[in-house]
Image: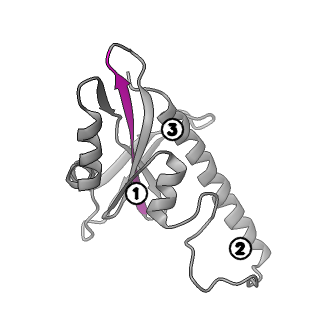
Amino acid sequence: MIAWLAARCDFPDYGRMLFYELPKDKLIFGPNQISAMIDQSTLISQQLTLWDQKGSGVIRGKLIVIPIENSFLYVVPLYLKAEGTNFPQLKRVIAATGDKVVMEPTLDLALSSLFGTAPGQSGPMTGNQTGAQTPLSKSTRDQAQAQLAEAQKAINSLKQILAAPPE
């Protein structure tokens, strides 16, 4: 991927364009490469084949590309539709970043699996954590809280998008 372009859909920035030009010297996977990685995952392809048999069908939602810091998060909702019904249900969420792809029942679990954190935790777990924490400066705490609030807002928006069945 060499660039990413989006239009804001929230007020007061509605319609404002965001454009990220990506460095040419660094390989950044685009939607086609991520889709190929998903298709090549044996665990995911086995599950999709199992679900996509007589009596039910798998609907792969649109690949959502989300810029986060200096990388991208890719999310694909998976819906299962029973034969004779017109109401698909969200069954799994596929999330990918870099060269790692995971599939979990919820967005929270997919993000936890992808980044190695427990749901609701803010960072990776390490084997030598103790009760003592290094005190942070007020500006660092304020910056971290602002970033956490922005990330939570983005996750909530993504959950709303994933909850809507594809048209």
User: Of discs 1 and 2, which sits in the foreground?
Assistant: 1
**Residue annotated with mark 1:** 72
**Residue annotated with mark 2:** 140
The residue under label 3 is which amino acid type? Answer: Arg
Could you tell me which secondary element the residue under label 1 belongs to? strand
N-terminal of the two: label 1 or label 2? 1
User: Can residue 41 be seen?
Assistant: no
Q: Which residues are magenta?
A: 71-83
Give the numbered dot on residue 141. Answer: none
Could you tell me which secondary element the residue under label 3 belongs to? loop
Q: What residue lies at 57% left-to-right and 74% top-to-bottom? A: 125
Q: CA distance from mark 1 to mark 2?
A: 24 Å
Position of residue 119 measured from the top left corner of the image (x, y, whole percent): 60, 58
Instruction: Determine which quarter of the picture holds residue 48.
Output: top left
Above or below 149: residue 134? below
**Residue annotated with mark 3:** 8
Position of residue 24 measured from the top left corner of the image (x, y, whole percent): 25, 66
